[in-house]
Image (cartoon, rainbow, N blue to C red):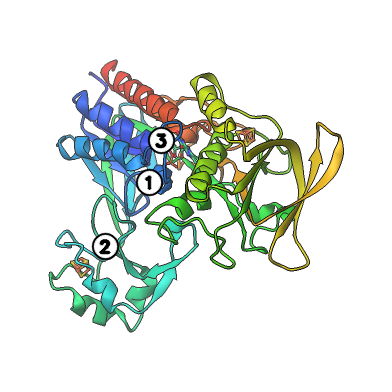
């Protein structure tokens, strides 16, 4: 331990990869700091309705992790926090963290009185903008930490004082400011994850123009009981259940103009979402338009099971264009049928674009030099001595692989400290 000033580990990103790293490292006896940008832990998994292949709700698994965090005094986590700078080297990093104001302190009981008093509404980012929420809000029903947040726009508005006065527990602090915190750590794990590829960039698919063209992540929220429709799968345009639903695979993926790589999970995500539709609308006709189906190893079984649905058509063909029909009520997909070698037009009520996973590091790089691949993923697990990448910041994966990768990164971070 001669060259190591500290044995602490910093984990950046509180999604399933980062949570796993932090918990595994702490349970191995290392003090761990977990830094999360959002006001809650759990990352994108918290926004899923169910997991493939078992189709269970993600909160079962997340809750087990939250319990392990609560039980372990070695983990300290900070939400609304981001890394500003990293200096130093393996065994001896100096890190500056920015803590953004929540305007609500630990006295909050989640009574909701501030939201009742608040008239300002903002876009609900948790539901991918499909509805609005009050500007004094709990990020979602299962949020950890269970504490309200005030939007900065509300704090600056004339409503702020009224909202503060509505709190019976003196939990609102309008004077809260951005703070910085300095940490000394021996090693760092970067696990800042992914975001959905921006479907607005897919010019021929009408996303943003036709309300009934949505994306796969939006479908997760439509099916979720905490979502914009309380779990009812309905068309955004008229609130009716769709009789025909099309899933468009590789929407922007494996395409040199967008994401040139395969995200590996979106075929399975569409199959899973087809089961959501089937559960609610037994006679719905479902199409999955695909180039190739990617369902490897044991997930092949899930594909085989979903394929048994006689009203679900796997259609090998690339969707070239999506338009509205003359009534303005249905969507027309122009598809190159690669088996029949013909062009077809298929009319449906709802389209779900299976967009891929883009690494957050592609437009928010680390504040220290590390190698990236051509797509913006961190190029190697050992990004530099003492700094490791975990989960979808490194490669697109499903949850099981993200957990394995988070565990592997914990081991690397521990080795980095222990060998010095
Ligand atoms: C439509 C869809 C459905 C899916 N369904 C399934 C499924 O059923 N089963 C399955 O196994 N997988 C599924 N996945 C994949 C799953 O979402 C990922 O495997 C999982 O989210 C990876 O977790 P992660 O921790 O690597 O990344 P993330 O979930 O993205 O977590 C990263 C965390 O880092 C935080 N962060 C970002 N930037 C910063 C920063 N600068 N500072 C601090 N924190 C930061 C983020 O806020 C986030 O909390 C699905 C994916 C899609 C697109
Ligand atoms: S901030 Fe106050 S009013 Fe709002 S939920 Fe928390 S305790 Fe209740
Ligand atoms: S997983 Fe399927 S939909 Fe996603 S990019 Fe790969 S082939 Fe396309």
Whether the residue under disc 2 has CB within 8 Å of ligand 2 = yes
The one of 96 and 114 positioned closer to us in this rendering: 114
Mark 3 touches mark 1? (CB < 8 Å): no
Q: Residue furthest top?
A: 419
Give x and y (percent) for residue 339: 81, 31
Q: Is residue 298 above or below residue 231?
A: above
Task: Give the mark nearer the N terminus: 2 vs 3.
Answer: 2
Residue 64, picture quadrant: top left
Q: Which mark is residue 46?
A: 1
Q: Is residue 83 left or right of residue 261?
A: left
Foreground tag (2 vs 1): 1
Q: Is residue 341 left or right of residue 122?
A: right
Whether the residue under disc 3 has CB within 8 Å of ligand 1 = no
Which quadrant is the C terminus positioned in? top left
Residue under pointer 2: 148
Task: Give the mark nearer the N terminus: 2 vs 1.
Answer: 1
Q: Is residue 261 left or right of residue 412?
A: right
Q: Say which element carries label 2.
A: loop
Q: Residue furthest right?
A: 342
Give x and y (percent) for residue 373: 59, 31
Dot 2: few (<14), some (14–19), or many (≥20) neighbours within 10 Å?
many
Name the residue at 32% across, 42% down.
Answer: 59
Name the residue at 38% across, 77% down.
Answer: 120
Mark 2 touches mark 3? (CB < 8 Å): no
Q: CA distance from mark 2 to mark 1?
A: 17 Å
The one of 149 and 338 positioned closer to us in this rendering: 338
Residue under pointer 3: 190
Give x and y (percent) for residue 96: 33, 46
Dot 1: few (<14), some (14–19), or many (≥20) neighbours within 10 Å?
many
């Amino acid at each position: 331990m001669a060259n190591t000033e500290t044995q602490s580990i910093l984990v950046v990103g509180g999604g399933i990869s980062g949570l796993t790293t932090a918990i595994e490292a702490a349970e191995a006896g290392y003090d761990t700091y977990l830094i999360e940008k959002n006001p809650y832990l759990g990352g994108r998994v918290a926004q899923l309705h169910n997991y493939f292949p078992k189709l269970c709700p993600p909160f079962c698994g997340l809750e087990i992790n939250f319990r392990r965090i609560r039980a372990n005094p070695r983990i300290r986590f900070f939400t609304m926090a981001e890394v500003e700078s990293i200096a130093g080297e393996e065994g001896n990093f100096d890190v500056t963290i920015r803590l953004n104001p929540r305007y609500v302190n630990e006295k909050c009981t989640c009574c909701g009185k501030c939201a009742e008093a608040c008239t300002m509404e903002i876009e609900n980012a948790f539901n991918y903008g499909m509805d609005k929420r009050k500007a004094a809000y709990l990020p979602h029903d299962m949020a950890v930490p269970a504490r309200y947040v005030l939007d900065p726009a509300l704090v600056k508005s004339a409503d702020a004082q009224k909202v503060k006065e509505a709190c019976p527990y003196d939990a609102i602090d309008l004077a809260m400011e951005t703070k910085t915190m300095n940490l000394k750590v021996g090693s760092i794990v970067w696990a800042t994850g992914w975001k959905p590829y921006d479907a607005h960039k897919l010019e021929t698919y009408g996303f943003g123009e036709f309300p009934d063209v949505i994306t796969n992540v939006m479908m997760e929220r439509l099916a979720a009981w905490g979502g914009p429709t309380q779990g009812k799968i309905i068309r955004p345009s008229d609130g009716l259940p769709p009789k025909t639903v099309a899933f468009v695979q590789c929407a922007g993926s494996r395409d040199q103009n967008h994401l040139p790589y395969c995200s590996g999970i979106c075929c399975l995500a569409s199959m899973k979402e087809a089961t959501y539709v089937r559960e609610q609308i037994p006679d719905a006709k479902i199409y999955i338009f695909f180039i190739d189906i990617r369902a490897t190893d044991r997930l092949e079984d899930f594909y085989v099971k979903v394929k048994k649905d006689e009203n679900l058509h796997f259609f090998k063909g690339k969707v070239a264009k999506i338009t509205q029909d003359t009534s303005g009520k249905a969507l027309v997909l122009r598809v190159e049928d690669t088996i029949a070698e013909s062009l077809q037009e298929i009319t449906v009520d709802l389209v779900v674009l299976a967009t891929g996973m883009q690494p957050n590091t592609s437009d928010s790089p680390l504040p220290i030099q590390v190698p990236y691949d051509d797509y913006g993923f961190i190029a190697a697990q050992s990004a530099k001595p003492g700094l490791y990448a975990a989960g979808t910041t490194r490669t697109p994966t499903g949850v099981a692989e993200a957990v394995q990768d988070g565990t592997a990164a914990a081991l690397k971070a521990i080795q980095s400290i222990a060998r010095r």
